Amino acid sequence: MAVTAQLVKQLRDKTGAGMLDCKKALVETDGDVDKAVDYLREKGIAKAAKKADRIAAEGLCNVLVEGNKAVLYELNSETDFVAKNDEFLALLEKIGTTLMEADITTLEEALAVDMDGKSIAERIIDATAKIGEKLSLRRVHVSSKEDSMTFGHYRHMGGKIVTLATIKGGDETVAKDVAMHVAANNPLYLDKSEVSDDVLAHERDVLRKQALEEGKPEKIVDKMVEGRLNKYLKDICLVDQPFVKDGDITVDKYLENANAKPIGFVRLEVGEGIEKRQDDFASEVKSQMKG
């Protein structure tokens, strides 16, 4: 597979490694970006990849909470300019209030829900034609809780990131603090029990190769790997992360002090995993001026 400049840039965005290192890694892995990430990590050039693919698509996410139900969803647009449009914002809000009243669990079900005589999918098509830019409802997540539990939600930068935290015990202030932490620190799991054996095996393999590449003696490598694996798990598990408002304690300790226990969380960030169209506006303007 040909190693293109776009692939090199994509790998660099994910790892922070230099251009030449990225190109070499892609050559070694036949253009497979995920394998190239592991290659760079094994060589000690890139740190553990925690974050999702770089933010690409525009639009906004939203979170609504009503009683024991919460809905989080993402409405995409092609440009940030349109995401600030009054019609886009009205559509975003209307979709949310409609979904709160509907009995749905999947995106497909959400798109089929009636909204003033037409399905949500049809309403989005109508808005696309009117605004002149493609809009799409990309993700919908519905959460429910028991009466003994508490929701906390947080909206960052008007909806570029939205989060929901569910706790048992504590109160809404505590739950919102956890939701804010989730927005800031982007944990991947609630705790270690959620991490699959496959993920652990893959991480051990990468860390072992990394340690051997560093020239560490074989007899101490396994012990080093377990130590680094535990640190990695603390970085990606919510309960083990240093609490965003007090780095001296973990999220778990903060909740314990508030007589609360974590139940779950959801985090949506606009454009996660979507490759953004690369527009060279300067060149476009120059070409128009020449005409």
Image (tube, grey):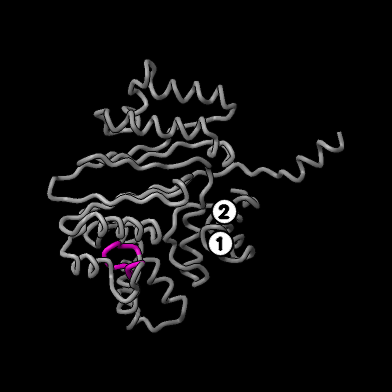
Q: Position of residue 213 (x, y in %)?
A: 46, 75
Image quadrant in which the C terminus is located: top right
Q: Amino acid at mark 1?
A: Ala
Q: Nearer the viewer, residue 101 or 203?
A: 101
Residue 25 circle label: 1
Q: Residue furthest left?
A: 148
Please report the residue visible at 81 percent of the width from the left and 38 percent of the height from the top.
Answer: 287
Identify the secondary structure beneath mark 2. Answer: helix
Please report the residue visible at 33 percent of the width from the left and 72 percent of the height from the top.
Answer: 246
Disc 2 marks which residue?
10
Question: Gap between marks 2 and 1, in whole Å?
Answer: 12 Å
Please report the residue visible at 53 percent of the width from the left and 46 percent of the height from the top.
Answer: 56
Q: Are marks 2 and 1 in contact (CB under 8 Å)?
A: no
Residue 173 circle label: none
Q: Amino acid at mark 2?
A: Gln
Residues packed near mark 1 inside 10 Å, few (<14), some (14 to 19) or many (20 plus)? many
Q: Residue furthest right?
A: 290
Up the image or down, 130 lies above or below 157; here it is: above
Up the image or down, 202 lies above or below 282; here it is: below
Please report the residue visible at 28 percent of the width from the left and 74 percent of the height from the top.
Answer: 249
- Mark 2 / mark 1, whichever is N-terminal: 2
The residues colored magenta run 236-244
Identify the secondary structure beneath mark 1. Answer: helix
Q: Nearer the viewer, mark 2 or mark 1?
A: 2
Residues packed near mark 2 inside 10 Å, few (<14), some (14 to 19) or many (20 plus)? some
Q: Position of residue 139 (x, y in %)?
A: 39, 38
Verify whether residue 279 appears in magenta: no
Q: Position of residue 27 (x, y in %)?
A: 59, 58
